[in-house]
Image (cartoon, rainbow, N blue to C red):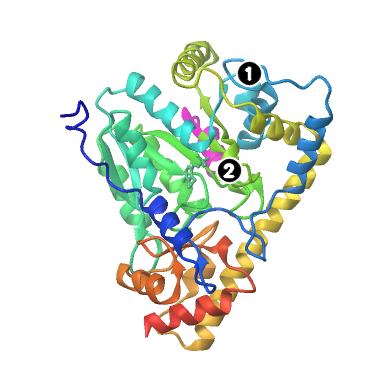
Amino acid sequence: SSYFANVPQAPADGILKLSVLSRADTNSTKVDLGVGAYRDDSGKPWVLPVVRKAEQQLAADPQANHEYLGVGGLPALTQGAQKLIFGADSEAIKQQRVYSIQTISGTGANMVAAVFLKQFKQPADAAVYISKPTWGNHRSIFETAGHVVREYRYCNYTTLGLDIQGMLDDLRAAPRGQIILLHACAHNPTGIDPTTEQWQQIADVMQERSHFPLFDCAYQGFATGDVTRDAYAIRLFVSRGFELLVAQSFAKNMGLYGERTGCLHAVTALPAVLPQVSSQLNRLSRATISTAPAYGAKIAGTVLQDAELYEEWLGSMEMMSRRIKKMRNLLRDKLVALGTPGSWDHVSQQIGMFSFTGLSKQKVDRLREEYHLYMTDDGRISVAGLNSGNIDYVAKAIDAVVR
Ligand code: PMP
């Protein structure tokens, strides 16, 4: 007998399962559009030139060492990250109403937020509302921290656009004071973002209902190519006087995936409560990771603090998002040219790393089994995995299974 005999098997993680299948597939025509990681036009991971430069600076610094970071993380990172999210001229920052703590990338930021809210949410029985659909890990993170998780409508599965009426109705119908998880930009998995007018409607309803916004910002710079435009929703809510939390990741926009670099930001209404909030976030971080990982933080901190590197980084984000948009339009054009049944405009209208194609599970299975084309079961493709060498093949494969 085993002490562990009563441990039930956990459900398999869709994305990780897909990566295993894809890695085992050695067919030369294989195209992996599963994982959300940027690839260059030859299908290779891309280390941003500014990251290389920052690494070289760090390697050349005779003072560099491997000491622990302080409990809040690396100030060069957390202060730069704060300005990136809220704006360099943010009133909230000037008024000392923002605390930022370094986390284990975006996932860790979500988890620290989840544990913090579980302990201090008002009312204590507030649920966490996530969009339907959302990043698969959201439910897992917030349930693991002990929250009840509910869904609000988000995707119109017929048009593959935003179901704004359904979303507003669900936010209105929820009891007062719920925690609403919002994707700041480049919604995963749908690639569907609210317009600026729709964000204002969302803010109106949330204010009416005294809901608490928790923003997940994993793709700033990837949606439009412009970090300011991609921070629109967060800055709107702050300017409206909301108190809120923001989980921020540098995985995608700086290509630091495995270095686990991110932050959690708290905005309070009054400077007076900030020390309470910061002390609790520090305590939670201390209890879970003790101190945050240093290497990615030093790279990102260097880029954020050096005016020249920062400018170059903005250019790289613009370039990555431009390549993705180009692939969206090409895929749409090729499907239209092939006369593939259905409308494909959503592929070019959606935004960020992903496209929610509308392909059924059955078609996704056929694409994988017959065409060695990998995407998640919900029909999501990582557009960043498309390139000039595989796009014809992908369009023809989709065309074949849709007919
Ligand atoms: N939130 C969303 C919506 C995401 O898509 C991701 C990345 N897949 C994350 C958070 C966190 O990623 P990471 O922990 O690698 O920063």
Out of 168 and 47, give the one closest to the viewer.
47
The secondary structure type at the circle numbered 1 is loop
Q: Position of residue 8 (x, y in %)?
A: 20, 38
Write down the residue under mark 1: 69
Q: Is mark 1 within 8 Å of ligand 1?
A: no
Magenta run includes residue 292: no
- Circle 2: residue type: Tyr
Instruction: Look at the image and tell me in which quarter the N terminus lies.
Output: top left
Q: Position of residue 397 (x, y in %)?
A: 46, 79
Q: Is mark 2 within 8 Å of ligand 1?
A: yes
On the rendered structure, is 347 left or right of 122? right
Which numbered circle lies on residue 45? none
Write down the residue under mark 2: 257
Q: Position of residue 11 (x, y in %)?
A: 27, 46
Q: Position of residue 259 (x, y in %)?
A: 60, 37
- Magenta range: 233-246
Q: Residue at x 46, y 70 (%)?
A: 373
Out of 164 and 9, give the one closest to the viewer.
9
Does label 2 or label 1 sit earlier along the sequence?
Answer: 1
Residue 43 appears in the picture as rendered: yes
The secondary structure type at the circle numbered 2 is helix
- Circle 1: residue type: Leu
| Residue that extends furthest to the front in the rendered view of this protein | 1
Out of 239 and 277, give the one closest to the viewer.
277
Choose top left, top right, bottom left or bottom right for residue 389.
bottom right
Q: Is residue 34 above or below residue 267?
A: below
